[in-house]
Image: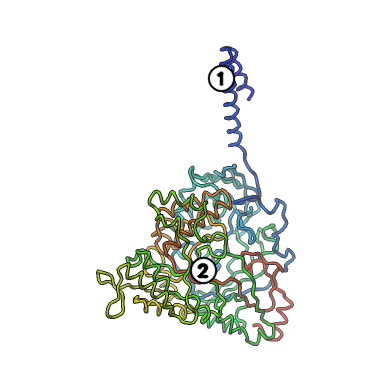
């Protein structure tokens, strides 16, 4: 600063005069501005975590998470059930069927919490460094982190894991994420720097870099492992649990690592309370329910309203040996829907898709099949402030108008109310009013009814809609939907297939289905880059999250705006605009969601009085009461 000032002063003295003095003052101002800009560029934030919007809630010296019991006892076992089968412990490949909880072995540099969707904190790092624009991040790794074999974790393992997912991760991840990283470099054995590609929205990038799961480089190479292949041997990670035993397709048992490096880490105090976590596999829910009654497994998160309403009156419940509890959930709705395979020619016309959606009768299904326990889904972001309502707000219009001006969206998006799910009669499975409306839409789209009652287009092709799934519990509601579709003249069917066949047919590059009951990706309560894996054009044919094959350049632009939102309010506005566009295209048939957690468990588990709003947390923050367990065993209520 001193040199710059003296040089400018010399210029003024040599030239003299009032005008030259003014020029010198301008030069001084420009020099000062440039130096200030460079100083700002060099300003580095050092922190114990990072938040998407706003400040971190937890201070650097926090002792434990606010929703845990820091004095929770350790020990015992919790067991749950899983459907179908498994033949792999690698959940990061499209090959095979990964066992439940197959990611339990691995940790990432940063870890989130169950009560704050914006924040992540250092787990494998001591601190993180980043500039105000978040264009790069340095992680200062902890020196006490070890893999489950006792070997130390270093920055080389982090670099290796990043490069592994970059080169061999599932295609939907690579197609979206790889271009965002300009470079990753090891600075020393416990420091690693991620630099992000210029032009990338940097808001979420430090957190995304910190979400990389860490494998042991040495173990991976020595055992000649392959991330793209299924395997019954897990990779070596740093997590709290290791694999104890398994029987392929029947049972898997995880045990707490006695030498787990992070047992006293503030993020882990009051967590990882069970010595063992056991998963029992059953072919269907009926067999699983009978096994629960018999005490074969001990914790059940019920998903079927009929069973919740009718089947929890067995002796163990009436004697209080099994606790039946409703626990409210503040999480976003799960997005249960029927998706169309947009690669199929019969689903190209939005009028066809709207007509097919009109035939799903939620009101009758909820009353007759679900005991009134489900709630209707209208929005992909149902049960959140991000759901679009009514006509666009001025803020939404500012996003949508340029897309209309460029011909990427129809002008009606600016004035029309956002579509909502049709209301049907709860008295009759077939709503005649919606049938008439759907018939008119199909007639208008060129699908007319023939003498056999089936609709065909001008080329004589039938309007076919084959739906498949492996879950037998979907049969009643899907059969009712099929019957309504057939009344409309659709050649509709719903078939139960085994899980491996479903995975093959519903995954890239096969996509062999007309329509599929599933959940759609909404990115949770704070959506970010993951939405591109489900809705971006680049993921149309390579993503298991974009099974419908959706591609729209207008939506691509809105997805960029999601990543670039600078405030929570701005993000909410962008998601509402995105929701409005997707719903206007009728690309899904929204179904229903469960507003609360319905849980039943043997009376030997306890949980904090106030549970976090966004997760049940039974495997992490609940604990085992040994005295209650002994009492259950003594009376023969538990095996």
Element on which disc 1 rests: helix
Q: Could you tell me residue 274's position as x and y percent?
A: 66, 69
Q: Is residue 487 above or below residue 610?
A: below
Residue in the image at 43% along x and 61% along y: 584
Q: In which quarter of the image is residue 279?
A: bottom right
Report the side of 14 relative to 561 (left or right).
right
Residue in the image at 66% along x and 70% along y: 275
Q: Residue 579 carries which label?
A: none
Element on which disc 2 rests: loop
Q: How crowded is mark 2: few (under 14 residues within 10 Å), some or many (20 or more)?
A: many
- In front: 403, or 139? 403
Locate the C terminus and report the quarter of the image it occupies: bottom right
Residue 157: tell me if it is visible: no
Locate the N terminus and report the quarter of the image it occupies: top right
Q: How crowded is mark 1: few (under 14 residues within 10 Å), some or many (20 or more)?
A: some
Residue 267: tell me if it is visible: yes
Q: Could you tell me residue 610's position as x and y percent?
A: 70, 67
Q: Which residue lies furthest to the left in this view?
A: 459
Q: In this view, does 26 lie above or below 542?
A: above
- In front: 503, or 428? 428
Residue ID for mark 1: 23
Picture mark count: 2
Report the side of 203 relative to 415 (left or right).
right
Q: Residue 377 carries which label?
A: 2
Distance CA(mark 1)–CA(mark 2): 66 Å
Q: In this view, does 395 lie above or below 277?
A: above
- In front: 583, or 519? 583
Query: Are circles 1 and 2 on residues that touch, CB within 8 Å?
Result: no
Of pointers 1 and 2, the one earlier in the residue sequence: 1
Q: Could you tell me residue 168's position as x and y percent?
A: 45, 56
Q: Could you tell me residue 11's position as x and y percent?
A: 57, 16
Q: Residue furthest bottom?
A: 315
């Amino acid at each position: 600063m001193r040199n710059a000032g003296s040089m400018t002063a010399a210029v003024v003295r040599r030239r003299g005069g009032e005008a030259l003095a003014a020029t010198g003052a301008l030069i001084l101002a420009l020099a000062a501005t440039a130096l200030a800009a460079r100083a700002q560029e060099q300003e580095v934030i050092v922190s114990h975590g990072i938040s998407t919007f706003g400040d971190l809630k937890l201070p650097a010296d926090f002792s434990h998470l606010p929703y845990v019991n820091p004095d929770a006892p350790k020990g015992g076992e919790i067991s749950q059930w899983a459907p179908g089968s498994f033949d792999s412990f690698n959940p990061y490949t499209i090959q095979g069927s990964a066992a439940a909880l197959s990611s339990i072995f691995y940790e990432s540099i940063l870890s989130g919490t169950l009560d704050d969707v914006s924040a992540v904190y250092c787990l494998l790092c001591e601190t993180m460094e980043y500039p105000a624009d978040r264009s790069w991040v340095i992680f200062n790794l902890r020196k006490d982190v070890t893999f489950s074999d006792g070997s130390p974790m270093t920055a080389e393992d982090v670099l290796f894991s990043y490069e592994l997912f970059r080169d061999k991760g599932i295609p939907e991840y690579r197609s979206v994420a790889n271009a965002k990283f300009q470079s990753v470099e090891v600075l020393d054995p416990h420091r690693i720097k991620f630099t992000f590609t210029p032009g990338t929205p940097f808001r979420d990038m430090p957190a995304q870099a910190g979400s990389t799961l860490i494998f042991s480089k040495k173990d991976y190479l020595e055992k000649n492992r392959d991330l793209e292949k299924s395997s019954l041997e897990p990779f070596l990670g740093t997590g709290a649990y290791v694999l104890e035993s398994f029987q392929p397709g029947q049972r898997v048992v995880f045990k707490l690592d006695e030498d787990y490096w992070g047992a006293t880490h503030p993020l882990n105090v009051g967590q990882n309370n069970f010595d063992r976590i056991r998963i029992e596999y059953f072919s269907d829910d009926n067999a699983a329910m009978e096994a629960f009654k018999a005490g074969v497994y001990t914790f059940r998160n019920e998903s079927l309203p009929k069973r919740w309403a009718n089947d929890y009156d067995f002796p163990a419940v009436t004697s209080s040996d099994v606790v039946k509890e409703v626990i409210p959930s503040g999480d976003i709705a799960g997005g249960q829907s029927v998706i169309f395979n947009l690669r199929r020619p019969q689903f190209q016309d939005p009028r066809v898709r709207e007509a097919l959606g009109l035939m799903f009768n939620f009101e009758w299904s909820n009353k007759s099949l679900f005991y009134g326990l489900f709630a209707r889904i209208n929005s992909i972001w149902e049960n959140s402030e991000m759901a679009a309502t009514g006509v666009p707000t001025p803020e939404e219009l500012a996003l949508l108008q340029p897309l209309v001006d460029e011909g990427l969206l129809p002008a009606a998006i600016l004035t029309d109310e956002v579509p909502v799910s049709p209301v049907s009669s709860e008295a009759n499975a077939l709503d005649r009013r919606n049938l008439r409306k759907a018939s008119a839409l199909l007639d208008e789209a060129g699908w007319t009814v023939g003498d056999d009652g089936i609709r065909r287009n001008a080329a004589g092709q039938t309007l076919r809609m084959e739906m498949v799934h492996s879950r037998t519990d979907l049969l009643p509601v899907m059969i009712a939907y099929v019957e309504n579709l057939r009344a409309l003249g659709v050649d509709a069917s719903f078939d139960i297939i085994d899980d491996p066949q479903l995975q093959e047919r519903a995954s890239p590059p096969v996509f062999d289905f007309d329509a599929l009951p599933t959940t759609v990706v909404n990115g949770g309560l704070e959506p970010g880059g993951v939405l591109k894996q489900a809705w971006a054009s680049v993921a149309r044919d390579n993503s298991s999250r974009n099974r419908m094959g959706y591609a729209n350049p207008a939506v691509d632009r809105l997805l960029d705006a999601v990543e670039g939102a600078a405030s929570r309010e701005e993000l909410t506005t962008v998601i509402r605009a995105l929701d409005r566009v997707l719903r206007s295209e009728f690309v899904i048939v929204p179904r229903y969601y469960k507003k609360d957690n319905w849980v039943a468990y043997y009376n030997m588990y306890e949980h904090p009085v106030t549970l976090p709003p966004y997760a049940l947390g039974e495997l992490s923050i609940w604990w085992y009461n040994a005295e209650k367990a002994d009492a259950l065993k003594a009376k023969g209520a538990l095996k």
